[in-house]
Image: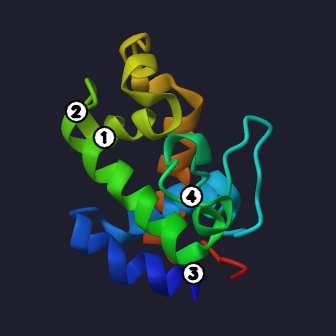
């Protein structure tokens, strides 16, 4: 259900579904119950404190979590200082301010992980658990 949600919703935000799936795989391995040490939650690892209009339960729900993640990706695609070869995805991990500090986003670990997951998806090798 999570893969279907991402695949169906991503184009509505101008995001390649396979890229969105690769990010979800890197962020949480498609686990809706994932919580990071920084407090990010859900499939797309959203920081609940950025969304005070939602309850923590709403941010954790896969439907809302994926929607918020795709909204962020759409925004970061526009405003991230890095553009070439989808390097704007580093903003999803660092935020736009943090991304400005990255000299070579192609060498940034998060970017490499997302691109590896994307290649696996494109080759039909990513087997999601959910």
Do the residues bearing badges 4 and 1 touch, measured as CB atoms within 8 Å?
Answer: no
- Residue at x-position 68% and y-position 54%: 41
Residue located beneath label 2 in the image: 79
Instruction: Indicate which disc residue 114 carries.
Output: none
Residue located beneath label 4 in the image: 44
Cα distance in 3D space between marks 4 and 1: 14 Å
- x then y, percent, for residue 14: 21, 63
Q: Secondary structure at mark 4?
A: loop
Q: Earlier in the sequence, mark 2 or mark 4?
A: 4
Residue 48 vs residue 21: left or right? right
Q: Residues within 10 Å of mark 2 (few under 14, many from 20)?
A: some
Count of numbered labels shown in the rendering: 4
Instruction: Work out whether 78 lies above or below 63.
Output: above
Do the residues bearing badges 2 and 1 touch, measured as CB atoms within 8 Å?
Answer: yes
The quarter in which the N terminus is drawn is bottom right
Residue 28 vs residue 71: left or right? right
- x then y, percent, for residue 50: 51, 41
Cα distance in 3D space between marks 4 and 3: 11 Å
Residue located beneath label 3 in the image: 2
Instruction: Indicate which disc residue 76 carries.
Output: 1
Q: Residues within 10 Å of mark 1 (few under 14, many from 20)?
A: many
Q: Secondary structure at mark 1?
A: helix
Cα distance in 3D space between marks 2 and 4: 19 Å
Do the residues bearing badges 3 and 2 touch, measured as CB atoms within 8 Å?
Answer: no
- Residue at x-position 25% and y-position 73%: 11
């Amino acid at each position: 259900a999570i893969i279907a949600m991402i695949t169906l919703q991503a184009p509505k935000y101008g995001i390649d579904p396979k890229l969105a799936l690769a990010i979800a795989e890197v962020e949480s391995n498609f686990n809706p119950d994932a919580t990071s040490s920084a407090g990010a939650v859900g499939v797309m690892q959203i920081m609940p404190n950025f969304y005070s209009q939602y309850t923590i339960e709403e941010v954790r729900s896969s439907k809302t979590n994926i929607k918020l993640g795709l909204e962020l990706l759409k925004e970061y695609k526009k405003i991230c200082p890095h553009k070439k070869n989808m390097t704007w995805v580093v903003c999803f991990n660092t935020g736009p301010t943090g991304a400005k500090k990255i000299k070579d986003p192609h060498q940034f670990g998060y970017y490499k992980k997302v691109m590896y997951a994307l290649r696996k998806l494109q080759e039909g090798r990513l087997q999601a658990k959910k």
